[in-house]
Image: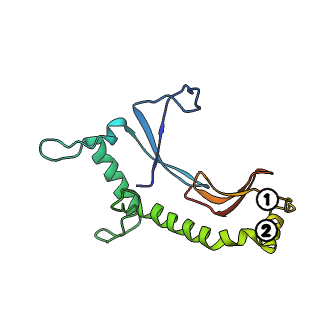
Amino acid sequence: MGYHHFHLGENIEPQGFATRTNDLLFAKVTREQFDVIAIFDHSVFDLERSANDEMRPERQRLWEVFHEHSSQGMPPGSAYIIPSMITTSGHSIHLVRLADEYSRIVRELDPKLDEKVFLAELYASAKQTVPKNPNLSWHLHVLDLGLLEGNTNTFFVFHYGQN
């Protein structure tokens, strides 16, 4: 559905996460925006259905909210594309396409890493000079794809990922 869920605990665990709570805040999160969708209890993740094949009430409410947000501003009866289609591998189509794009970028740019002109332009974009022995490796920082330079710990982003 493209939502993140956040536990509403008031205490922070040693790993830096809030303590788990039964109540969860669902939000649509981008780099620029944080839109609260709704608060659900943890049963929203329960996939079991009732004897008459109905979803649990909290999960049903999540789907109702999802459809309401997905069709916002559309006239009743309109058709719309499902925003978060899932592939047979279980991944969202968006992430599959993102992986394809990352593969294309690596295939295109990796051969250029030995070219002095390419390296000069790359480092110039970060206002740095090319080190004598560049230590570049492909790296994902969260979902941002780029090259990490090990000597200076500089991350050259080639594609910003989701969020």
Across and down, in percent, residue 114 comes to 75, 69
Callout 2–callout 1 Cβ contact below 8 Å: yes
Mark 1 element type:
loop
Q: Quadrant of the C terminus?
A: bottom right
Q: CA distance from mark 2 to mark 1?
A: 9 Å
Please give left or right for residue 107 compared with residue 92 in the image: right
Image quadrant of residue 161? bottom right
Please give left or right for residue 114 compared with residue 42 in the image: right
| 115 relative to 70, above or below | below
The structure's colour scheme is rainbow
Image quadrant of residue 133? bottom right
Q: Which mark is residue 119?
A: 2
Across and down, in percent, residue 82 comes to 36, 65
| 125 relative to 153, above or below | below
Q: Earlier in the sequence, mark 2 or mark 1?
A: 2
Mark 2 element type:
helix
Q: Which mark is residue 134?
A: 1
- For label 1, count other residues whose C-alpha is less than 10 Å away and answer few (under 14), some (14-19) or many (20+): some
